Amino acid sequence: MATNTYTVKIDAKDIPKLREICEERGFEFGEKQWAIWHASKKGISGGGVVNVTVYEKGPKVLVQGKGTEDFVKFILEPEILGEARLGNEEVLMPEMFEPHFGVDESGKGDFFGPLVIAGAYVNKEISRELLEKGIMDSKRISSSARIKKLAGIVRGIKGLEWEVISLKPEKYNELYEKFGNLNRLLAWGHAKVISSMAEKVPSCPSALSDQFARKEILEGMLAREKSAAHVELTQRTKGESDVAVAAASILAREAFVSWIERASDAGGVGLPLGAGENVILAAKEMKEKHGVEMLDKVAKMHFKTAGLI
């Protein structure tokens, strides 16, 4: 199956060089949210359309479209990366193809909506199929329709077990008051997901989570879960580069954006993401329409944003 999406970290010094290469080959440039630049062209080496986006965070390059493989193999790898990575993931990242759970969350930085934590189990065959089908970290995907499509793909892969825990705002606010700290609450949720996954796949020996706090916080929470006693935990920054974590991020994001859409429709107020000025305005509108008690049902009340409403 052809690869229609590819993402890779790039050195900042190589960004101007990549732009120059794209300019020389007649790419058309435009703007995209959170991107340094975005370019597209039809017919790379006789292939289909290819879109190239360089994101500030990382920085990273995201290549999408039917011309992805040609762009990566004939331009990105030889002229920028200096090595052949596409198709060689098992050599470069062998641990990604070992049986393991990936865990990620969505919504922790958004005033409105739940905190969602998801997990996905992969082995060699599942990891290969996820990569072939373009599964990537959900933070790189701005389209909710695309997120929902990818989530359907993830759930449809044979052998891939998954779990999603969604803490609706009321429950989130209750638990936050109990734990008194977001990292402890996150650790509790991650441990619950890993425990549930361990019950589904008892033979799985390890779990990978993006590092959000000191390692011992999550390890302490996980030690309380009997079903996960045998699971070796690894935490690392940029954990979403692992395909199991990426799959979990997509499942978590789908649950989050779906809740936001339902709550917006039910309340008659569009609930924006983040915690900026537009969020404050929406919260004030929600308060005026449904009363101050509604905020506890739709928002994370420990955010500083709550004090500005």
Image (cartoon, rainbow, N blue to C red):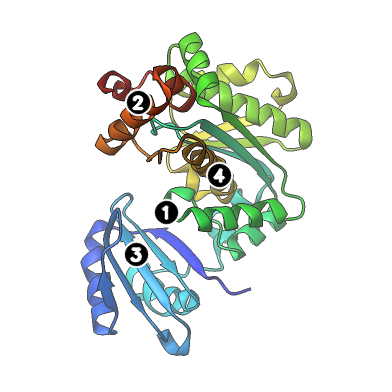
Q: From the viewer's side, name the closer residue of 193 and 239.
A: 193
Q: Which amino acid does label 4 sit on?
A: Val
Where does residue 145 sit, x and y in percent of width and height?
52, 57
Residue at 58 percent across and 18 percent down: it is 221
Q: Distance between the residues labelled 2 and 1?
A: 30 Å
Where does residue 274 sit, x and y in percent of width and height?
35, 37
Q: Which amino acid does label 1 sit on?
A: Ser
The residue that disc 1 covers is 142
Q: What residue type is labelled 2?
A: Glu
The residue that disc 2 covers is 288
The residue that disc 4 covers is 245
Q: Earlier in the sequence, mark 2 or mark 4?
A: 4
The residue that disc 3 covers is 53
Residue at 42 percent across and 32 percent down: it is 112
Q: Distance between the residues labelled 4 and 1?
A: 18 Å
Q: Can residue 208 be seen in this view?
A: yes
Where does residue 138 sit, x and y in percent of width and height?
48, 49
Quadrant including the N terminus:
bottom right
